[in-house]
Amino acid sequence: MRDLHIQDVSMRFSLPDGNAVQALKNVSLEIKSGELVSVLGPSGCGKTTLLKIIGGFLAPTSGNVVLGGNKVTGPGPERGMVFQQGALFEWMNVRKNVSFGPDSKGMQKAESDKIVNHLLDVVGLKDFKDKAIYELSGGMQQRVALARCLANDPDVILMDEPLGALDALTREKMQGLVLKLWKETGKTIILITHSVEEALLLGQRLVVMAPRPGRIHKEFRLPFAEQSVGADLRSVKLQPEFGKTREEILTMIWDMEEEIMGHTEEAS
């Protein structure tokens, strides 16, 4: 079991004019191995900053991130990242993008090919392995990004608005795929999103963050991710409890945005 512990993490950025921005303050969170956690909040609440700290791309001003008893001090293969844009290697085809991690570790070609073929089958791209990246739609590119991440067999998958640029129908299909992969692989997934509906659907646990400074405002434990695996997502969204929770969170975030705007107007 490789549980993730975010321990009293704060992040302060110094600005060129001598001022500073407190992006995060005293954020603590414990995530069990295999949990699916969605993180939601208004712009500027530090969601992406927190994800980068977990990924090891940023060192916090104070506090620690510990995975499986080991302190995170930089990027590592046990934490995979999926970005809003696929961040794929345009000069490589689909198969080579997915095999990049195993090949970099010196894995035998036969073993690497087996992993790649399996993952491309899982994400529905087995017939596209020799295609160039530019030949794929946005949704297909994100499928490649997911497969490439999984090819490294990370313990934790970090997703930063991975479906935000997709059209509504493709986004819903990809939400179903994320749930399928979570259930089948048992990976820990932390997903950042601006969509309340998406956070509800994809969060076993949903963490709402508040801004200025970024901190955890409220946490929800929800049944919808389990219910949505292999199900019609629209039928889950029609549940009264789903609608009630959505309105509660929307009101919460709306009130935060109103408070931010009020502070901005006072400052001006």
Image (cartoon, rainbow, N blue to C red):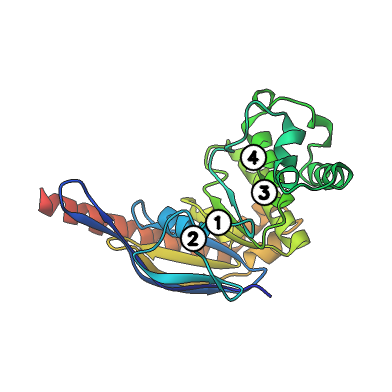
Task: Identify the mark at residue 144; answer none if there is no mark.
Answer: none
Residue 36 visible here:
yes
Dot 2 or dot 3, earlier in sequence: 2
> In the rendered image, which residue does mark 3 sit on?
149
Q: Which residue is mark 2?
A: 39
Q: On the rendered structure, is 221 left or right of 183?
A: left
Residue 191, numbered circle: 1
Amino acid type shown at disc 3: Cys
| Image vertical order of residue 9 relative to residue 40, above or below | below
Q: Residues within 10 Å of mark 2 (few under 14, many from 20)?
A: many
Q: Secondary structure at mark 3?
A: helix
Give left or right: position of 165 versus 157: left
**Dot 4, how many residues are within 10 Å of its Cα: few (below 14), some (14-19), or many (20+)?**
many
Q: Tell me the SS state at disc 2.
A: strand
Q: Are marks 2 and 3 in contact (CB under 8 Å)?
A: no
User: Amino acid under label 1?
Assistant: Leu
Q: Position of residue 114 (x, y in %)?
A: 87, 46
Horizontal and vertical percent for residue 144? 69, 39
Measured in 3D between alpha carbons, the distance from the residue under mark 2 to the one under mark 3, in whole angstroms, is 20 Å
**Residue bearing mark 4:** 142
Helix, strand or loop status at disc 4: helix
| Earlier sequence position, callout 4 versus callout 3 | 4
How far is disc 1 from disc 3 in space, using C-alphas? 14 Å
